[in-house]
Amino acid sequence: MINLIDVSGFIYRAFYALPSLTHNRMEVGALYGFCSAMTKIISEFPKSMFIAALDCGKKTFRNDIYKEYKANRKAMPTQLLDQIPFIKEACKRFGFFIAEKSGFEADDVIATYVKKGREHKINIISADKDLVQLLGKNVTIYNPVKQEYVTEDDVLKKFGVTSDKVLDVLSLTGDTSDNIPGVPGIGAKTAAALINEFGSLDNLISNLNHLPNNKKNEILKNEIDKAILAKKLISLKDDLEMSFEYEVSVPNGISDFLTDFGFTSLVKPKQKQFF
């Protein structure tokens, strides 16, 4: 099995959710939270390959398409930024393959390895809704927050469509968390109803002139360019030039690493044997 870890989701959650923790006067709360989560993940999915996907660079190709992309996000706090090198080192010690590509996001890296590793069973470890579009044959998604797999039933309940149509629904609604505008007046339920009726965003666009004449449909016709833009921004790049060779991850010196930072509670007897 190939486990694709969305590192950013883990470290941001740890940084903001856990109380301040210092080691040699340096903030290490996110590092501790990440390492704690990874010890559990490794126990959950033993004897498999782990790829740690990271964002790389402040701007991506999406900013070239739309300069306001994620403009609502604050810059990564310095206290968290300073922990990134140690988080990467932790990944190495856990035996993870670190994957990042300048100008692209971790989601694109994950999408690329889903495509590259299609001959293996693939498990995405993330709570990011954008990754739901990758769910499918031989590809599972494990939500580390809920500690359960995301099923097609879960997707249908949340988005009103199956996973292969989630991208089209999000294209219509936009994504406020990433500052991506959608079509005005088109909410989640309306978007799902339209995509279920027409099958896809492309087919909806081809049939705009056949929609009944009413105010909402007029807005849809006049503002459909926002959905087209949103789809470009939300679509994941799966063709990045990245190396891949399947290899079971083997921890190397993680116990010493955890001990050096004072994370002795994470080094339990059975974990010592594993590490």
Image: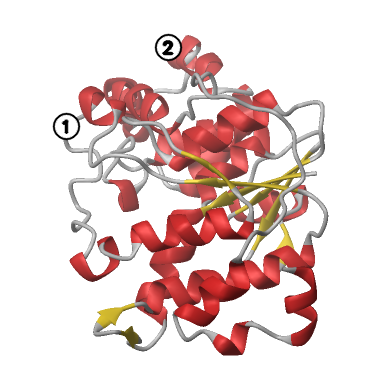
What is the quadrant of residue 138 in the picture? top right
Residue visible at 65% across and 41% down in the picture: 161
Assign a secondary structure to mark 2: helix
Q: Which part of the image, by quadrant, shows the N terminus?
A: top right
Residue 225 seen by the camera: yes
Three-letter code for the amino acid on which mark 1 is drawn: Lys
In the rendered structure, find residue 155 and report the number of the disc placed on it.
none
Assign a secondary structure to mark 1: loop
* Residue 187 locus on image (x, y percent): 42, 47
How crowded pointer 1 is (Cα within 10 Å; few <14, some 14-19, many 20+) is rated as few
Is 177 rendered above or below residue 137?
Answer: below
Q: Which part of the image, by quadrant, shows the C terminus?
A: bottom right
What is the quadrant of residue 252 in the picture? bottom right
Residue 120 as seen in the image, left or right of residue 163: right
200 vs 29, nearest the viewer: 29
Residue bearing mark 1: 67
Number of labels in the image equals 2
* Residue 20 locus on image (x, y percent): 32, 87
Counting residues from the N terminus, which is met first, the one under dot 1 or under dot 2? Answer: 1
Residue visible at 60% across and 67% down in the picture: 254
Residue bearing mark 2: 209
Mark 1–mark 2 distance (CA, rounded to whole Å): 31 Å
